Amino acid sequence: MTVALASALPRVDDQDLIDRIIGEQDGRPGALLGILEQLQDANRYKYLSMETLEYVAIRTGVPQSQVYAVATFYALFNLDPQGTHTVAICRGTACHTRGSRMLLERVKLQLGLSESGTADKLTLTTPDRRFTVRTVACFGQCALAPVVEIDHAIRGHVKEQALIREVDQLRRDGSR
Amino acid sequence: MKIQDIAAFAAVREAGLAKLLPSRPRIAVGMGTCGSGNGAEAVYHAFKNEIDSRGLDIGLSPVGCFGFCAEEPLVNVWVPGRPLLMLRRVRPNHVDDILDAVGHNTPVPAETVLCKIEEWDHLTGHIKYGVGYPDVPLWRDVPFFHGQVKIVLRNCGLINPDDIEEYVGIGGYQALYKVLIDQNPAAVIEQVKAAKLRGRGGAGFLTGNKWEFLAKAPGPDKFLVCNADEGDPGAYMNRNEIESDPHALLEGMLIAGYVTGAARGIIYVRAEYPLAVMRLERAIEQAREYGVLGDNVLGRGFAFDLALVEGAGAFVCGEETALIASLEGKAGRPRTRPPFPAQKGLLGKPTNINNVETWYNVAPIVSKGPAWFTETGSPRSAGTKVFSLVGKVHNTGLVEMPLGTPLSTFIYDIGEGGTNGRDIKAVQTGGPSGGCIPADMFDTPVDYETLAQLGSIMGSGGMVVMDADNCMVDVARYFIEFTHSESCGKCVPCRVGLDKALRMLDRFTTGVASQDDLPLLDELCRMVRDTSLCGLGQSAPNPVLTSLRHFRHEFEDHIVAKRCRAGVCQDLALSPCENSCPLHMNIPRFLQLYKEGRLEDAFLSVVLDNPLPASTGRVCQHPCDDRCRRAGIDEPVNMRDVHRLIADEILLSDRFDAAVERVRERRLEPTGREVAVVGAGPTGLACAYYLALFGHSVVVYDSRPAAGGMLRYALPEYRLPKAVLDKEIELIERMGVRFLFNVDVGNDISLNDLAHQYDAVFMAIGTWKEAWVYLPGTELTGVLPALPFLEAVSREQEVPVGKKVVVIGGGNAAIDSARTARRLGAEVTVVYRRERRDMPAIPEEIEAAEHEGVRVAYLASPHRIIGDKNGQVRALEAVMTKPGEFDTSGRRRPVPTDEVIRIECDTVILAVGEKVDPDFCRASGLTLKEDGTIVADRYSLETSRERFYAGGDLITGASNVSNAMGYGKKAARNIDKRLMGQKRFPQLLPEFTYVMKPPEEPVDIGRHTPSETPAAERVQSYQEVSLGLTPVAALEETSRCLRCDIHTTER
Amino acid sequence: MAEKVKVRIDGEVIAAQAGQTILEVARANNKYIPALCYMEGLSSVGACRLCMVEVSGVTKLVPACTTPVQEGQAVVTASPQIDSYRQIAIELLFAERNHVCAVCVSSGHCELQSLAQEHGVTHVRYPYSCPRLPVDTTHPRYVLDHNRCVLCGRCVRTCAEIEGAHVWDIAGRGIGSHLVSELQRPWGEATSCTSCGKCVQACPTGAMAEKGWAVEEMTKQRTVVSRLTSMREGS
């Protein structure tokens, strides 16, 4: 897809990588989703910057407003830099009935995150960008409820104290 | 290697079979996400290292998941000629023993043995493993698997999902091959139609019809889409299916591609399922390599290719038009239909979308025929459905059952009841689009139509089991919060309607809702359901509408009583313990006051919450233990014994008079109002005490010569010394309560007389009538009802008890009778027809009885009492029972066996339940229920007659002391409010100031339990059994409290 | 030549062309069906759900703006249930954002306001959300007040379908949905905007307005879009 580049391309890091990803996805169903997913994954802070979005829009010929609509519609995309450690708390039904809200409240409290998040999804990052706490609709690990994912490793049958201890450990490891 | 002809196909099949049934042993580890989450990776690597280092000739392979998530990790061990042995909860430290067992034919660790499989019908092929292991149950004899029919899950957990050859080995891709050779697409569509296969994603549209639409659409440019965007929280069958058997999905899509003339397929899978994505990628790659996908499928000239698209986290993309928008690179907002995707779908081309599970049914239907398929299931819903059984149920996992199976089979037979034997309240089906079905409707067959009639849906097959700890208002709110955050925002009813519904539900859970909110919420939900654009909005109100239908009383509790019985809605409770306490005692407060060394203040706090703190401190069923959050760390705080100690320290010391004075100071000004209380049991005492504190003049009538009711006349001295009770009653009396003993209301004075003399009447007589069991021989001499027996003992009267006593029953009265008879020197056997865990008696009491030498015969149903020629009891015969199906109380119904036992005895005590004797209120105009209890308003406790209130056992039937007192307290508040026109209860309480700071770190001290008089010593006398906590132990106990009364947000 | 069909709307038999929607046929025959997201000349999206009607043989209510007429169909445009649902939908819109007619340039010429009057909506029974939303005054000629936006998407479609600029889209989802220009840029900095102003004319409320008008002064040329469409089709 060679689109007449009506606007000047914004400066982005890893331009080659972005071009390659866009090239690979070209013409595939769900191409825009695939491009954004891969770009976010490739980013050190796991997010999509405004420059990246603008670059993608211009290169793919998709209107900027549509790229932005897509990036803000899906829960997986982050428009803000994410913390070094991610604590994802499952809010599935089985986890809810086994007390996942309490786990969320405790971790937020522990990390000093007080906002209750926006309506569409909860993602909170500590000001020092060390931790991101987020909720996930359901990991599909319901038999292990309540489930928490810490840095992409699933923990089942999580108890409040154990979770707090683990987060504390991560906090201490990082400050050494 | 590309399969281009039948010979090549057969060769791959042979190769695959040889992997499944090699000439050497094979060990397979279940490595779905569930298994891995439970440590399957470590087990796999332990096997690998050990096999390598020992140089063993044993094959090792990963497989998918066999569905029994609660028992993961699962490991299959097969030795040639023997059955496949399925092991559970395998840990790396089992590996050595398992390998030894395989090598030397020694037994595998017994705790890991789950079941065996002798042969397996993969439907497309059949595997015979072998015979042997006589002591190991067959897989279908394990309760969790019993009755399951594995069509969709036919290969899951048995073959390596990453190896196409194993799939071909069990007959995979043969159905596809057949379809390609037959070259009769229309016939295949007819087969699918005849099989009445319905979409497994939720709506249940007939798959054959959808395929026909697509086949009729002109041109080759059409799409097949597999919807694997499984988003229902609580449902994960699609993940498991793909992770365990990806090729069966490919085969289903390939067959559909051929018969509908579509050349391209897309699988839209959730990005949250990385393992499923990986396995699918691998399967697609292998399928291309083997010529199963591509320009020339299996050499038959058919071209089909598949693409994988990862969703990015939007529940609404399960909606087909939203999924299409997402595939087109847009936000996943649904659009209106018509046009339907079959006319105008992806990129404007005809498109057919089916759920993952639907595709898994295709190959078996083609290979075994529609008639075979419709044999399973109900007439309108053929085949099976995979359900995820999770939540508060004993066995969790994936269950594939014929459609039309009753819910009770899932919950009680397969799930084996609630977690830790707790009662189940409801099951939630269909996720955010479904609803909660109450336990008394568990005979409902699970199929598309029946669940819809109940206001729920089958949906993707999630079943989340709920118990008494789950609040139905909270669950409804939870689902609305979910759909509200997943709404795409396009249409007004869903975007704004769900937001408003959520705000309204917030008012319920925080206790600020009013009665008007119920109809308003109901109407709003109907509007959202009837006018939303897509399935998400149309079904999102279902959780609220079904809860309003089946659990309206819980909503009313939140509005009227501002109470959440489940203790979930935190704003309505001080702390979980307070919420669970029938008297709503401020438990953290008295713990803290005692901790601060302020015994007098602690006593004042306790006694203003509960006028019988020493008695309840001994005999309460302590529901607070079940809710204490300390249990998450070690064990619950022993709150009951602390308040017993606080009470004892004051009541039984010289500080008593001063303490009484402090309570008297709390009394409000005399009001001049007069109230009669009928019954001086715990309910009446509690009510009279608070009425007196309110400043009313109170007279308590009782037919017995002293106050205390059951506490005095039914509870044995060794559990509750009467000296303690006397002190408590003295305190109540000193608040100004007057007692009129030996007056039988109903005979000596009528209720109508009371109505003339008093401003209000509170009735609280107990359940003194012993239920009579209809058993041959109850007329014999030596058969005694329990309560009169216990009363006679407590009045120190002569009791006709022999040397060998049998007690029939399992409640507290039965255990009290047995222990009392033991103290009278008898040998005692309790006969109970169910299992121990079903016994209503307090577990500690049962244990103590056993220590004292009381024998208990469980699962023994009394059959007849045998007498001698003088009409004297000689023996009891009981039929042994076994636990059968679950009844509506969630307990297993005892089923008689052929075995009969005979217990020689000279006395039989009947303790099979106590009832209200409603004789006293005849001709009083009060409405009674069938069981003799009085009808009273759930919240105000006012009866059908104005100014007459009732509470305790009289309205609930036999219960326990604390419940009874809770009613007395509540009645006093309501009577006072009625007489004075305002809520004055808070005025009774002084301002307590005490430390409001939670512990930084929970103290590392275990639960203290009181010491007991040794069993041998105590059966000789009526000396109190429990010696209570020492002050030191009590002080430590108070420091164990986590202070849940300080809410997390304030910490 | 399109096929002719006969339908019955509120009892009256009406001749229509196959492919026409119920709403088009009704409006052409002076039968009133309310609608907010519908605009002649734009594609129909069926988002506001005000035009829900009963159709014979269908158990659910259907949106008139996207449902094509069918031979022999009987349509009921109003009933106690439909009226009550329409009232709720209007109340919901009022409760969603901050619609204060007394200070609105479009008061008196506002479609939301007219709908409330027509349907007897005199108060709102649901809790108001009162969100704090920005007002974008960066464009030299126009102003966008998110407090008055009902998310009908008419501006989005006008810009994409008529002007071809696609400046606007709806970002976020659910109750957090909001109108964005480009990558959430201030309108005045959106380079793709041609400042044609058709979106402003398409806006049913005072969310988009020309600068310089006082309360009640902003009237809109609603027919701009349909006129353009018909002229283009004619050419």
Image (cartoon, rainbow, N blue to C red):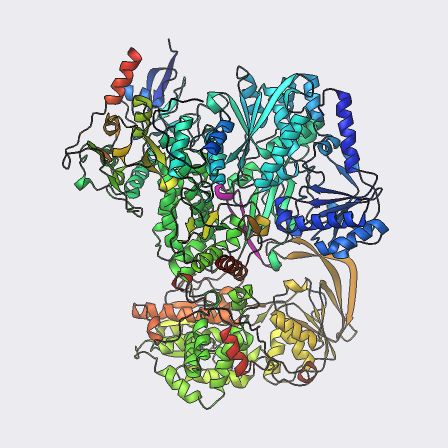
Q: Of residues B92 and C170, which is closer to you in this image?
A: B92
Q: Is residue B644 above or below residue B395?
A: below
Q: Quadrant of residue B382?
A: top right
Q: Residue furthest bottom?
A: B654
Q: Is residue B616 above or below residue B575?
A: below
The quadrant of the picture occupied by the N terminus of chain B is: top right
At 30% across and 68% down in the image, what residue appears? Answer: B982
Task: Give residue B276's position: percent from left, percent from top.
Answer: 60, 38
Magenta span: B422-439
> Taking the image as drawn, is residue C33 in sight?
yes
Magenta stretch contains residue B144:
no
The quadrant of the picture occupied by the C terminus of chain B is: bottom left
> Taking the image as drawn, is residue B382 in sight?
no
Q: Is residue B134 above or below residue B331?
A: below
Q: Of residues B920 and B7, which is closer to you in this image?
A: B7
Q: Quadrant of residue B1045?
A: bottom left
Q: Is residue C126 above or below residue A31?
A: below
The reply, left or right, for residue B501 in relation to residue B406 is left
Task: Give residue B465's position: percent from left, percent from top.
Answer: 56, 51
Magenta stretch contains residue B423:
yes
Task: Give residue B573's position: percent from left, percent from top.
Answer: 42, 63
The reply, left or right, for residue B459 in relation to residue B732 is right
Q: Residue furthest top?
A: C1
Task: Give residue C126's position: percent from left, percent from top.
Answer: 31, 46
